[in-house]
Amino acid sequence: MFKASNIYEMENFLLSKSSTDDFVFSANKRGVPNGVLSADDIRRDVAIFARLLIRVYVGWPVHDEITKMRILKHLINVYNDAHEISAGEFFKLLKPVVADIPDNHISIRFGTIRFGTKYKKPYKNVGKNIAGNKIVRGEMRDGVVAAIGFSAMIKSDEFKNAIVDFAKNILPKSNALIMDLRGNTGGNSWYSDLFAEHLCGAWIDSMQAVYVRTNRDAKEFLSVVYPTAPWAKLPESEELVVWKTGKNYTPDINKAYMKPIYILTDRQTASSAEMFLLRMLHHPCTVVVGDNSSGTEVFGNVGSALLPSSQIKFNIGMNYRVLSQENFELNGVTPNIKCPENTDALTVALREIANQQILSQAIKQNSNAL
């Protein structure tokens, strides 16, 4: 039975029990939803899980020592106490590890059951996305308000064409814009980031810097899960490596959409939807309405591997993003107008726009009278 008093010893013990040759990325034919695992199976999966966590997961060098100590002690206890149990029971033993990590992206999955951090904030209902059952839906509201809802961020021709059509045929006729990100848990930000560029009149960066891991284990992992990754050819290093840095946070007001912009968010607004939101926060006309966004952007670009004996899927972030807002992960963006529970953020935004227009007209009339 192994005992250790410090992080270094615990890491080295767990790492000594596996290698990158043990990484598995596709399910075996038999599967084990109801399978029984031997003590050796448990020890093997714990060691591989630890290697993925310690050597591949981009958040491991960032998290505090207390969190690491607690996680490593738990893994070693599971390793030491290994005995014949079901794969489902083993899944339960790994839950406290993932629950202890303050990262909204990291998770384990067993069959259809997904489990993540215990620090996730509770959801508050501030209305449903106007996209409904569509990925993107654009329309004119109240005759002068351009409204577009994104239920997810997708890199597809359908998604691109919907945005292009909206920007060409609806947006120019508007006096204000509402963008609905409620319930949008992310996806691929390619076309939504280009839409942010269109609205801002310039490319706006969502982060200050992005770090990646390029040690041998991380490179082996990356070569399978994301072989075309833009950072794949960076030199090998044991330290976190800067992949890219942000350069511009200033919209071009001569090219930008310089009318009121209201963005609707809730606790399900996450990942690439938050990337879009963070770009738009630099626009001087942006007002956020609803509830806090998820706070799922610091650790991202998720890759997955399987624990070979249990077939538990382990999802880990490969990018660590330094954002302009501190303590973003788990907290997200706080709206300018925070809606109470069961208040529709869209109704609030439309009312705010109407009030602003009435005020603007009154000011204009008073000015003409003088």
Image (tube, grey):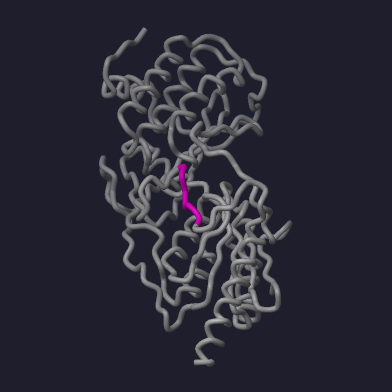
Q: Quadrant of residue 112?
A: top right
Which of the two residues, 259 or 26, is positioned nearer the viewer here? 259
Decide if residue 299 is on the left or right side of residue 92: left
Which of the two residues, 342 or 158, is positioned nearer the viewer here? 342
Residue at x-position 36% and y-position 32%: 54
Q: Residue furthest front?
A: 370
Res. 93 in view: yes
Q: Is residue 308 positioned above or below 215 on the image?
A: above
Q: Which residues are magenta?
A: 330-335
Determine if the magenta segment contains residue 332. Answer: yes
Determine if the magenta segment contains residue 123. Answer: no
Q: Is residue 135 positioned above or below 77 on the image?
A: below
Residue 282 horizontal/vertical position (percent): 41, 66
Residue 156 horizontal/vertical position (percent): 61, 64
Residue 317 horizontal/vertical position (percent): 44, 43
Q: Residue furthest top?
A: 1
Which of the two residues, 283 or 221, is positioned nearer the viewer here? 283
Quadrant showing the N terminus: top left
Residue at x-position 64% and y-position 19%: 35
Q: Is residue 190 positioned above or below 93 on the image?
A: below
Res. 301 in view: no
Which of the two residues, 37 or 271, is positioned nearer the viewer here? 271
- Picture mark count: 0
Q: Quadrant of residue 244?
A: bottom left
Residue 276 horizontal/vertical position (percent): 49, 61
Residue at x-position 26% and y-position 24%: 8
